[in-house]
Image (tube, rainbow, N blue to C red):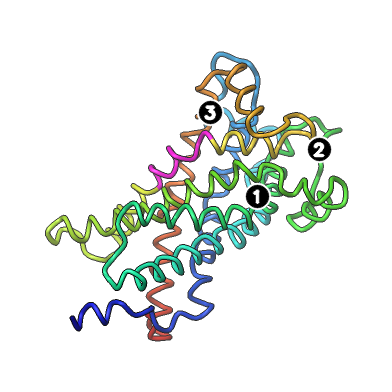
Amino acid sequence: TATTTATATRPKGRGGVFYLLGGTSSMMAAACTHPLDTIKVRMQTINTGLAKPPGVIKTAVSLVSKEGFFALYKGLSASLGRQATYSTTRFAAYDFLKAELIYRKGGGDLSVPERFATGMTAGALGGLVGTPMDLCNVRMQDDGRLPAAQRRNYKHAIDAFVRIFREEGFTRLYSGVGPNIIRSMLMTAGQIASYDTFKQLLLEETEGVFVDDLRTHFVASALAGGVATLLTQPVDVIKTRLMASPPGTYSGAMQCAIETLKKESFVAFYKGTLPAYSRLAPQTILTFIFLEQLRKLHKALTGSE
């Protein structure tokens, strides 16, 4: 039919700028939510053996009282660098692969399994590209927890990257790459693919209650943030501990997981879940709200689809 023929064409007008919008919106959101990410990292790297590890408020108060308010923004440059590499790659790959799959199917839309498979593929690419900056981010956020003699005192993300490369070798920049890729696959499926799915359900199954506006973007992204948090938290804890630990502490992700389970129980894999969601939900909401607006602006300026 004429409709099928029209929908079975690749989107027009999507130049390089279009594929940068996901990374740009992620950087904007990360700048707003970075303090919560710092608290999450501190909670995940605390291994006190206490029956009741410190919570979000206690961790935040301790951090600010010992290191000052701006300690909450340690690693911001690395966080922005991470989003510039990791999120730009995963959003661009997802958008490209989604459009290509729809074209090859002859039009229509992707099923939920197809969306999640696309998200996991895009996430794997993002995790691979973003691991070095992710390592810098974790190191800078966790530095204040270490004894003064063991602190690295990186000046900024580039300094961290160069020093790790010079002092510890290129392979150290990919410390934790395995769990980071797995986390990125789950994150992208739970975040981007879930958002796509929730948005479609809200628009098509609510009999006009939701339309393509800010309210729909807010609800869909809040739900997607919850899915992403539950999927990624165990892997995130392992990844963070691998990256924050001194060289030689763990032989790999499996040993880290086993040691954590033995010493601290399964609950340890969900350390920092509340700050993780309280960071990821706002970040997801802001990312997609920014992204939808940037896409509208891009469409208005270029006439792209």
The residue under label 1 is 134
Identify the element where label 3 is drawn.
helix
**Which residue is painted at 43% across and 79% down in the image?**
298
Image quarter in which the N terminus is found: bottom left
Residue 58 in percent (x, y) is at 56, 27
**Which residue is painted at 74% across and 39% down in the image?**
143
Instruction: Please report the bounds of the magenta region as a residue range.
Output: 225-234
Compare marks 1 and 2 and give the one earlier in the sequence.
Answer: 1
Q: Which mark is residue 269?
A: 3
Image quarter in which the C terminus is found: bottom left
Q: CA distance from mark 1 to mark 2?
A: 18 Å
The residue under label 2 is 151
Residue flagged by tag 3: what amino acid is it?
Phe
Does residue 302 appear to the left or right of 158 in the view shown?
left
Residue flagged by tag 1: what amino acid is it?
Asp
Is 28 situated above or below 234? below
Does residue 152 appear to the left or right of 85 in the view shown?
right
Q: How many marks?
A: 3
**Which residue is painted at 54% across and 59% down in the image?**
87
